Amino acid sequence: MGIYDSGCLGVAYIDLNGFKLINDNLGHDVGDSLLVALSQRLLVQSRSDDVCFRLGGDEFLILFKINHHQHYQQEANGIGRKLHQLLTQEVQIEGQQQPIRVGASIGIGIVPHDDKDLARVIALADNAMYLSKTERQPYVLVADMEASVSD
């Protein structure tokens, strides 16, 4: 079974909120340790078919299989909630007295529902992530983005 067997592929574009302040106030070593800890969380908690990438800085991209094509929005919402909870839990970094917590903004797009081209869906998920950040929502689906913009 491959990641695209159901004919439906999810794309989660993630940006960590408050990460720059951690680097600026606690140092880049602490920021690097935080990125490693969050990356390991993503890898441990992801399904065997999921593919996780660090794009650079504090941005991540996750490709995930949608199991039920007809219920793709419910699955995408569930993935969005899970990712947000996973990334916003406190992290204890060695050498730090207090645990560290960051926020996360997540945009989620679905191939082929949002577009048939993966590169285009990644760009749309990036836009949804920025909407998540500005609207202070844990995650935004690309399908819901047009409704939010037109409100």
Image (spheres, rainbow, N blue to C red):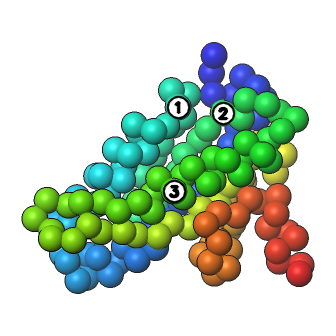
Q: Residue at label 3?
A: 85
Label disc, if present, on residue 7 of the rendered structure:
none
The reply to whether residue 62 is visible in this rendering is: yes
Whether the residues at callouts 2 and 1 have beta carbons within 8 Å, the answer is yes
Figure quadrant of the N terminus = top right
Type of amino acid under label 3: Gln
Q: Element at badge 1?
A: loop
Mark before the other along the chain sequence, 1 or 3: 1
Give the residue at x 20% y 77%: 26
Mark before the other along the chain sequence, 2 or 1: 1
Depicted 137 relative to depicted 139: above or below: below
Front residue (pair 63, 119): 63
Type of amino acid under label 2: Lys
Depicted 83 relative to depicted 71: above or below: below
Type of amino acid under label 1: Arg
Give the residue at x 53% y 31%: 47
Is the residue marked by circle 3 packed among few (<14), some (14-19), or many (20+) residues within 10 Å?
Answer: few
Task: Judge left or right: residue 10 versus residue 151.
Answer: left
Q: Residue at label 1?
A: 47
